[in-house]
Image (tube, grey):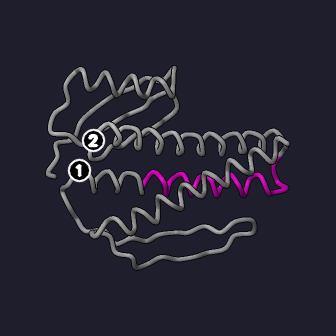
């Protein structure tokens, strides 16, 4: 029963990631759709993207670049942890720790995506949420950000991550 919940949760997360990836490829005219490479692993198929990006000073494209870097780093770490779990060279405790770390990565990723969507729903053109343990950094695309708006964003994040230390910044927009 517990394994089925994890499997369905992982499937939902992978589906969400796939939908967001396809949307970002279709939505952004600045991105080149070249270099899409498919590789097959023992248990899963991963899509690795080598996207040639146009150099731009727009904060929104910088947000996309930051998201891509974080995603690539997490995918690399997730792949190493998966190899550790499937290897016979590690003890059960190490495999359990690796599994917990993969779950934590997945939760952080889905929480970041959900918070970014909620912040955009508040009327901001773009938002970047980065979670590192108990530290959460929120950067919104706005011309200016009042204390009231910053407090609203902190409250929104605290509703999802109660014990987090939240930092809110804004990026001057050229939109």
**What residue lies at 27% left-to-right and 33% top-to-bottom?**
169
**Residue 124: mark:** 2
Q: Nearer the viewer, residue 154 or 77?
A: 154
Q: Nearer the viewer, residue 18 or 108?
A: 18
**What residue lies at 60% left-to-right and 45% top-to-bottom?**
106
**What residue lies at 18% left-to-right and 56% top-to-bottom?**
57
Measured along the vertical axis of the image, is residue 121 above or below residue 83?
above
**What residue lies at 57% left-to-right and 76% top-to-bottom?**
38
Q: Quadrant of residue 149?
A: top left
- Magenta segment main secondary structure: helix
SS class, disc 2: loop
Measured along the vertical axis of the image, is residue 171 above or below residue 40?
above
Counting from the top left corner in percent of width and height, residue 107 is at: 59, 40
Counting from the top left corner in percent of width and height, residue 20 is at: 47, 58
Closer to the observer: label 1 or label 2? Answer: 2
Q: Is residue 112 left or right of residue 45?
A: left
**Residue 156: mark:** none
Q: Which residues are magenta?
A: 69-90
SS class, disc 1: helix
Density class for disc 1 (Cα within 10 Å; few <14, some 14-19, many ≥20) is many
Q: Is residue 118 left or right of residue 14?
A: left
CA–CA distance between discs 1 and 2? 13 Å
Report if residue 77 lies within the magenta region: yes
Q: Quadrant of the N terminus?
A: top right
The answer to which of marks 1 and 2 sits earlier in the sequence is 1
Return the residue at label 1: 59
Counting from the top left corner in percent of width and height, residue 163 is at: 51, 20
Q: Nearer the viewer, residue 170 or 120?
A: 120
């Amino acid at each position: 029963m517990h394994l089925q919940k994890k499997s369905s949760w992982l499937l939902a997360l992978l589906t969400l990631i796939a939908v967001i990836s396809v949307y970002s490829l279709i939505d952004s005219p600045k991105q080149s759709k070249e270099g899409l490479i498919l590789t097959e692993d023992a248990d899963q198929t991963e899509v690795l993207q080598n996207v040639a990006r146009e150099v731009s000073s727009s904060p929104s494209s910088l947000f996309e670049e930051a998201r891509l870097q974080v995603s690539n780093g997490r995918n690399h770490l997730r792949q190493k942890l998966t190899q550790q779990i499937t290897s016979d060279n590690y003890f059960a405790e190490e495999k359990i720790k690796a599994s917990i770390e993969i779950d934590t990565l997945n939760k952080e990723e889905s929480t970041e995506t959900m918070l970014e969507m909620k912040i955009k729903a508040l009327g901001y053109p773009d938002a970047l949420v980065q979670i590192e343990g108990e530290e959460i950094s929120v950067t919104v695309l706005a011309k200016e950000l009042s204390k009231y708006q910053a407090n609203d964003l902190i409250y929104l994040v605290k509703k999802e991550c109660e014990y987090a230390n939240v930092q809110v910044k804004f990026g001057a927009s050229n939109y």
